[in-house]
Amino acid sequence: MQTTTIHPLCERCESMLRWAAGVLASVAGLAIAVMIAVTSVDVVGRWFGRPLTGAYDVVELLGAIAITGALPYTTACKGHVAIDFLIHKLPGRISRAVDILTRLVTISMFAFLTWRFVQYGMELKASGQVTLTLRWPIFWMPCWMALCSAVMLLVLVFELVRPGKELIKP
């Protein structure tokens, strides 16, 4: 049996990518915990006629943080529901070609999303857009989404270069 060795630089890049996906997932988990706390305080406050002002704004922002922060980690540990049954029924070369094509399309999509999120964040900053109730600036949200999309892009490139290998073991 032949073992393949990975260049130390590639190992370092994989390690940094694992770390980045883990940090984003941790932030996503924290966002979910804070969403639960904010919603609970708001519901209890409503019972006493004192709802939490801006709860909707906070939960909306935290929901976006949670969803986008969890994407790279979920992809890195292959936690998404995959529809591979169709690809597995195809002959080997065609199956591999379809797999590569779908990965390239997905990489292109996330590259475009990263670029557009950065642009949109700059547009929101220039316009001074804020949340409806709390009047918090929201330009940073597309920047967060761009960061998550960029890490997702790197995870997808890893999967293209190292097919079948999990970046993170769940």
Image: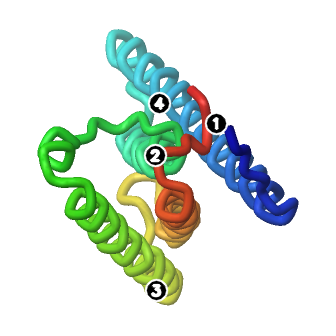
The percent coordinates of residue 101 (x first, y second) are: 28, 71
Residue at the spot of label 2: 75
* Gap in angstroms between the C-alphas marked 4 and 3: 28 Å
* Gap in angstroms between the C-alphas marked 2 and 4: 23 Å
* Gap in angstroms between the C-alphas marked 3 and 1: 26 Å
The percent coordinates of residue 53 (x first, y second) are: 43, 38
The kind of residue on which mark 4 rests is Met
* Gap in angstroms between the C-alphas marked 4 and 1: 14 Å
Residue located at (77% from left, 56% from top): 6
- Is any part of residue 136 visible from this angle? no
Disc nearer the start of the sequence (3/1)? 1
Front position among marks 4 and 3? 3
The kind of residue on which mark 3 rests is Gln
Work out whether 6 lies above or below 44. Answer: below
Disc nearer the start of the sequence (2/1)? 1
The kind of residue on which mark 2 rests is Thr
Disc assigned to residue 26: 1
